[in-house]
């Protein structure tokens, strides 16, 4: 939950942003992002070896694995993974790689079985990945079963969302999420039920697609008859978190009827999480969760967008929808309206992806200048470089750490100015 103080500070910051006529004095100059970060195979390899290897990645939702024995194949991150609901109640993740000669232990998308049996020669593993039995064991003299378990992958949950991490060390999920873990509690992601999950294939680099959802500078142009009706982008407040995450909070318009825009989100009679506070109810409150998630959580439902590379020039945008339980039966019709509305907004957001991709691969593209309004994108890139290790990044592809600790939550140089403006309103 946000405290009263945090809510008051956000209100003050929104008012501050609305009246400022230049970026705050202490905000640094942002060097251009090198164009090669989007199109150069060297950077793609660095992302693969570091970003996708060392980050906590959203792999699924517990409602997809409701009972012990339920399993699901997950290959979106480019690794063959089996998620399995164990009898212990925990969700385990293994490589779908038999310890004998690498055949799959699962070939179905999903299913339920108490043990995983390799199709090739019949080795059998339990729901913790332990090797239980092998055919013709007498011909494997001295085989130590305890060394031949399925290779496990770190797997933790936040709420009912399942995350995996291919690195054997590094922070746990709660350290990774940092502040966001407690800040998102009011949205009850441990209670919310999975409503839908679907994927869009996009013809652009995954970062082009994701960055369309990490700033509100585009809102008046791209979303004139949808998002722009309910969001005053000049009042937007970006907050940067140390792990590379970011948040935006922007109010609606003081002087406009926003009913038409808000219909999709607050239709009468829908179940709500009453723990959700006033900022989410009256503003657009959205998070980018490092490295590849974007989510505006809400009282009647939350969606999470997950962006994945599909080669250098294509990507996948995955949409998870969760919301309060509606009881028995199929999902109520309001969900169809809500999801259709989001999809129409996503059509707007993704419309230039393939065009931008073409431009970025042309002789004419060199780099990206970012404004103060787009600070979350720069912060994301400099956080990527920190994760990779700046010394590993060729000079022509690197993003200097221009944004200093003074801009990282809970530090915020705007706050004293914004608070002062509230106590001493200008004449
Ligand atoms: S590869 Fe699995 S049993 Fe041989
Ligand atoms: Fe957008």
Image (spheres, rainbow, N blue to C red):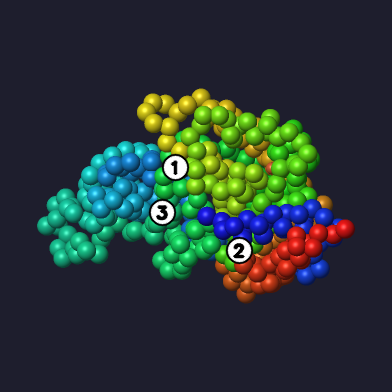
**What is the secondary structure assignment of the residue under circle 2?**
loop
Taking the spot 40% from the left edge, 56% from the top edge, the residue there is 156
79 shown above or below 382? above
Residue 88 rendering spot, x and y as whole percentages? 25, 53
Q: CA distance from mark 3 to mark 2?
A: 21 Å
Check the image and name the residue furthest to the bottom.
391
The numbered mark, 3 or 2, whose residue comes first in the sequence reads: 3
Q: CA distance from mark 3 to mark 1?
A: 14 Å
The numbered mark, 3 or 1, whose residue comes first in the sequence reads: 3
Quadrant in the rendering for residue 42: bottom right
Residue 192: numbered disc: 1
**What is the secondary structure assignment of the residue under circle 1?**
loop
**Closer-to-camera residue (141/202):** 202
Residue 241: numbered disc: 2
Residue assigned mark 3? 157
Nearer to us: label 1 or label 2? 1
Residue 5 rendering spot, x and y as whole percentages? 61, 61
Nearer to us: label 3 or label 1? 1
Q: Is residue 22 left or right of residue 41?
A: right
Check the image and name the residue furthest to the right.
427
Q: Is mark 1 within 8 Å of ligand 2?
A: no
Q: Tell how many labels.
A: 3
**Closer-to-camera residue (306/8):** 8
Q: Quadrant where the C terminus lies? A: bottom right
Taking the spot 52% from the left edge, 55% from the top edge, the residue there is 1
**Closer-to-camera residue (178/162):** 178
Q: CA distance from mark 1 to mark 2?
A: 25 Å
């Amino acid at each position: 939950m946000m405290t009263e103080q945090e809510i008051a500070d956000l209100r003050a910051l929104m008012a501050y942003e609305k009246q400022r006529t230049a970026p705050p004095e202490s905000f640094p100059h942002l060097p251009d992002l090198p164009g090669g970060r989007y199109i150069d195979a060297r950077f793609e390899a660095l992302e693969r070896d570091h970003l996708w290897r060392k980050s906590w990645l959203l792999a699924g939702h517990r409602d997809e694995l409701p009972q012990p024995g339920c399993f699901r194949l997950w290959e979106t991150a480019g690794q063959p993974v089996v998620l399995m609901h164990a009898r212990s109640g925990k969700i385990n993740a293994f490589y779908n790689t038999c310890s004998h000669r690498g055949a799959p232990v699962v070939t179905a998308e999903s299913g339920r079985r108490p043990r995983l049996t390799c199709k090739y020669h019949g080795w059998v593993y339990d729901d913790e990945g332990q090797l239980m039995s092998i055919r013709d064991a007498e011909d494997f003299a001295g085989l130590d079963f305890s060394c031949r378990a399925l290779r496990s992958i770190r797997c933790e949950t936040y709420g009912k969302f399942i995350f995996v991490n291919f690195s054997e060390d590094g922070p746990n999920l709660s350290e990774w999420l940092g502040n966001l873990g407690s800040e998102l509690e009011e949205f009850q992601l441990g209670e919310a039920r999975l409503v839908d999950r679907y994927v869009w294939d996009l013809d652009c680099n995954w970062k082009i697609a994701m960055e369309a959802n990490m700033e509100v500078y585009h809102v008046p142009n791209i979303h004139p008859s949808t998002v722009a009706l309910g969001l005053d982008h000049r009042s937007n407040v970006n907050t940067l978190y140390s792990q590379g995450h970011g948040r935006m909070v922007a109010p609606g318009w003081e002087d406009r009827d926003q009913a038409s825009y808000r219909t999709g989100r607050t239709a009468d009679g829908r179940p709500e999480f009453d723990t959700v506070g006033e900022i989410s109810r009256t503003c657009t409150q959205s998070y980018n969760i490092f490295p590849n998630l974007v989510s505006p959580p809400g009282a009647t439902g939350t969606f999470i967008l997950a962006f994945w590379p599909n080669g250098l020039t294509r990507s996948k945008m995955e949409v998870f929808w969760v919301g309060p339980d509606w009881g028995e039966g199929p999902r109520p019709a309001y969900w169809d309206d809500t999801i259709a509305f989001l999809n129409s907004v996503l059509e707007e957001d993704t419309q230039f992806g393939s065009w931008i991709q073409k431009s970025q691969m042309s002789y004419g593209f060199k780099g990206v200048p970012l404004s103060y309004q787009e600070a979350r994108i720069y912060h994301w890139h400099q956080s990527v470089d920190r994760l990779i290790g700046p010394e590993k990044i060729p000079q022509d592809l690197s993003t200097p750490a221009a944004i200093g600790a003074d801009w990282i939550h809970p530090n915020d140089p705007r706050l004293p100015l914004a608070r002062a403006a509230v106590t001493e309103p200008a004449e």
